Image (cartoon, rainbow, N blue to C red):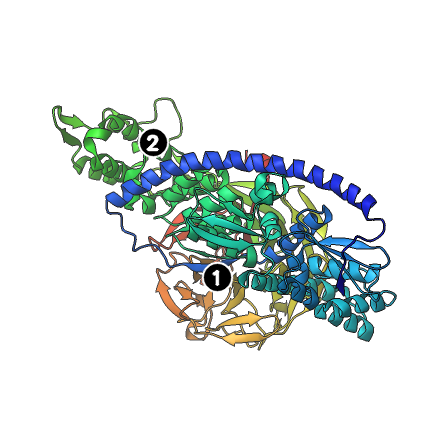
Amino acid sequence: MALAPRLPRGWEERWQREKEQRRRAMEEGGEKLEEANRKLKWIVEFNNRRMGAKGRSQEEGEEQSEEEEVQMHCRHTHPRELFHALEELRASALLTDLTLCTVDGASIHTHSAIMAATCSVLHQHLQSGGAGCWEASVLLSAEVQRVGLASVVEFAYTGAIAGLNRDTVAQIRAAALVLGASRVLELCTEEEGRGARAEECRISAETQMELALSAVRQLWLERLGCDVELEVEGRRFPVHRPILAACSDYFRGMFCSGMRESAQRVVTLLLLGGEELEALLHCCYSGTLGLGWGGVFELTCSALQLQVQPALSLCLRFLRGRMDARSCLDVAAFAEAYGLPDLRELAKDFLLINFQEVAATPKFLDLPGERLLEVIGCDGLCAASELPVFRAVVAWLEAEPEERLRWAPPLMAAVRFPLMTFREFCEVRAVNLGMEVSGAGEVQLYGSALSQFGFPVSDGRDPCRVRHPKDALILVGGDRLDPDLGRRPSRQLWFAHALRTRTGLVKEVEWRLLGEMPEPARFRHGLGVLRGQLYVIGGCHFYAKSDTLKSAYRYDPLKGSWHRLADLREHRSNFSLVVREGLLYAIGGDRDINNNVDSVECYCPDTDCWSLARPLDQPLSGQAAVVWEGEIFVSGGFNCRYECLVSMFLYHPERGSTLLSAMAGDRALHCMESLAGRLYVAGGVCNLRKYYTDQLACEAYDPRSDAWSSLEPLPLPHVSAASAVLEGRLYVLGGYCMEDSSDTELLHRYHPLSQRWENTGRMPGPNTDIRACLCRLPAHLRQ
């Protein structure tokens, strides 16, 4: 290999074409830069306002010790997204600084850092200073032909070679040998040895891009091939222009638009902190970002300012997933200031759902009067009763009585006194109703609001609070007792349209019929949600030994349509169905009335095929399973002798089962759900005195400490009930009582903070052997 002082034949024509492509790309980049600058100006204005508010908070002595420590967060799709963007830059000849040429006249524009991450020869060339600053051209030896060179470049940007086959492998191997592309040589060896398989190539491509990104990151750490330096607060950060342009529209516009920064060796960035920039650059080169409440807002602001998408997505994911009562008001204010409507709506919804917890925080007292009035006047506000709403308003008024007195009449009018019980109203009357205001004497807080108690609202409106959860709680199948016809399986699908809170502790659910599943009706089935669609698997269609099903269906809520899927390999009912990493797992279950199984089946929606995974350690049915942080946890159930178990274990489709700490009590036909970092088990039956009886005791499992703790018992039996977690509450729906075989027509809800069960209403139809899930439904069904 030698450096070519002159260009190969045909270069001028190709150069003119590429020049035109660059011109068009620059125009496009200029538009992106202009848009980014508009965003920057807007962000700066709001940032100044936010920093002023931050300063006031610190002057007031706001505690910082509660901020959690920084933890690393990873965007697993970053390598694929980054190299896809880099390939787009290369295809448009943008920011390419290395041209690879063959003796037969082929030439390919590339980015030196990307090629050096794959080819050791080009890595050495980069070390010698042959690229990374201005364009260089490399004329390769005669062994390298057009097909081989193009394949190596394709691999460097995609992690795969689509045209690798027996006809091309020799040319690709020759190019890989000359360029020192060892990973390409491995692919060639695999092809020559046993042939390439599509699935292996797909998985290999993901891994190859991760390896390539790691190599690029090492170049960055060694400052090899860095073609620009970013200066912030007197510090300089050497970087690769293509990496920044691939991760940020701001930098793509800056470097590709023909502006003066595109030719500068050092670019100064204003209104940005050095620590924030360093974290963003690390994210660009690794897909990871250290986040904690102490600095997440500053990092999000910087990611917005520079439009660094990998970091911005991680920051927003953190704000959405780690929001709690102490932080939701900050998140809402930040989202409003920086024009993030989705995040603002999420924070607003969190406040409404967890009003009592948020009202107990010091930051609640800093809410503007307009915002507080909007919150307590909202129908969707959730509170155990109207009394906590009244207390929150009084606390807010008393925090700054002279300044907030004018808000007393509208705020108290928004408190829904007609929803209070007489006992609650007596407590309200016992509160000091007046305030001493300097120069004005005693001023009453209520005005005429108290006159509403015990009387209907004057305009005839229902004073209840009505909440419409964004995710719909859906019930599928099951059976119920018909006085005339006995037990009847169901094909119905119901969803909870609204949650209503009426006077005192009276709560109810407004149910709507969603539709019916195809024949036959079924119960004791599996239900899962994947990619916004419902999967109804197996179960029973009647009560005889031969009535177990193996059929499977998928329901699309947007289209309202059903699609028949491939059958299970085995008939099964009373089994667990979980979703893990885009696949469905049907675990254990009953083959018929007297035989349960240890088999586990895995369904791939892309291929519509069921395959066998590693079996359980013993036959199991009536167990409960849930996925927490990618791991499958399985509790209780019946063994082969149909005895209730106390076991809890981890199940892995390849490694099998790992026993964990056992529950305090045995149970089967119960529920288990993941909520706030713990796994809650409730309901079912147990083997008290050698026969089945109702299991009312409830427990919670902490996966981090492998320990159980007891909860308040259920007020009623819920055997073979449905369960779901909706808006931070555990719902247990329906079931039956083992003692007298009566149906449990109620649903109960558990709040981890209050640690109490409450009656939330009645079931709409079927009660027992029913299944529940959460799914987002189209808007026309929610009107």
The quadrant holding residue 407 is top left
Closer to the eye: label 1 or 2: 2
Task: State whether residue 172 appears in this view.
Answer: yes
Label 1 SS:
strand
Residue 582 position within the rendered picture, expressed as x and y whole percent measured from the top left: 62, 58
What residue is rendered at 60% in x and 67% in y? 589
Residue 713 position within the rendered picture, expressed as x and y whole percent measured from the top left: 37, 60
**Count of numbered circles in the view:** 2
The residue indicated by pointer 1 is 672
Residue 708 position within the rendered picture, expressed as x and y whole percent measured from the top left: 39, 68
Q: Is residue 516 left or right of residue 463?
A: right
Amino acid type, label 1: Met
Q: In 3D space, how far apart are the residues under numbered discs 1 and 2 (Cα atoms)?
A: 38 Å
Label 2: few (<14), some or many (≥20) within 10 Å?
A: some
Amino acid type, label 2: Leu
Nearest to the observer: residue 621 or residue 264: 264
Q: Counting residues from the N terminus, which is met first, the one under dot 1 or under dot 2?
A: 2
Label 2 SS:
helix
| The residue positioned farthest toward the right in the image shown | 167
Q: Is residue 655 left or right of residue 324?
A: right
Task: State whether residue 502 appears in this view.
Answer: no
Residue 390 position within the rendered picture, expressed as x and y whole percent measured from the top left: 27, 37
Label 1: few (<14), some or many (≥20) within 10 Å?
A: many
Task: Find residue 573 and name its label.
Answer: none
The residue indicated by pointer 2 is 373
Placement of 69 over or under 30, stated as above or below: below
Nearest to the observer: residue 256 or residue 247: 256
